[in-house]
Image (spheres, rainbow, N blue to C red):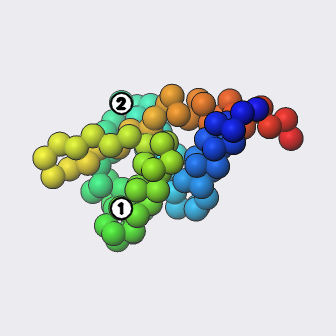
Amino acid sequence: MTNDDYALIARASDALAHPARVAIFRYIYNKNLNRETVCNKDLVEEFDYAQSTISQHMNKLTLGGLIEVKHEGTKNFYFVNLGMLGKYLNSVKKLNI
């Protein structure tokens, strides 16, 4: 394992370190699999959190590299970064624990 692997695991794991973020990530992943878009409004309706709470969670997932944001006007659309997810899973497998 390299230092980059350790850094990637730490960053992505930190992004997923809250149960709400795991649920949000899973929701976006499943919607993306079905070729459906996800915006802020969808997340607020699905999870019954305040917009500010959703924004905080999405910021953490985005900083962790697991979510990509596409801005269209006043809306943000969210997509799982499959490349990052794959790198994260491969790095975790390298831990051999």
State left or right for residue 32 relative to residue 85.
left
Percent x, y of residue 96? 85, 35
**SS for dot 2:** loop
User: Is residue 80 shown to the viewer in this render?
Assistant: yes
Q: Residue at label 2?
A: 35
User: Residue at 39% across / 68% down in the picture?
Assistant: 53
Report the amino acid beneath label 1: Ser
Q: Secondary structure at mark 1?
A: helix
Q: Position of residue 69 (x, y in %)?
A: 33, 43
Contact, CB < 8 Å: mark 2 with mark 1?
Answer: no
Q: Residue 20, percent across and down?
A: 52, 61
Q: Is 44 on the left or on the right of 18, as rendered?
A: left
Looking at the image, the residue that sits furthest to the front is 3
Question: In this orientation, which residue lies closer to the viewer: 95 or 82?
Answer: 95
Query: Considering only vertical position in the picture, is 94 above or below 69?
Result: above
Q: Residues within 10 Å of mark 1 (few under 14, many from 20)?
A: some
The C terminus, quarter of image: top right
Asked whether residue 46 is in view, the answer is no
- Looking at the image, which residue is at 52% across and 57% down? 21
**Residue at point 17%, 42% (across, down):** 72
Q: Give the quadrant of residue 33.
A: top left
Q: Residue at x 35, y 61 (%)?
A: 55
In the rendered structure, which amino acid carries the disc numbered 2? Arg
Residue 39: x %, y % from top left: 29, 49
Mark nearer the viewer, 2 or 1: 1
Q: CA distance from mark 2 to mark 1?
A: 22 Å
Which residue ends up furthest to the right in the rendered image?
A: 97
User: Which one is earlier in the sequence, the residue at label 2 or at label 1?
Assistant: 2
- Estimate how packed mark 2 is, as few (under 14), some (14 to 19) or many (20 or more) residues with alpha carbons within 10 Å: few
Q: Which residue is mark 1?
A: 55
The image quadrant of residue 3 is: top right
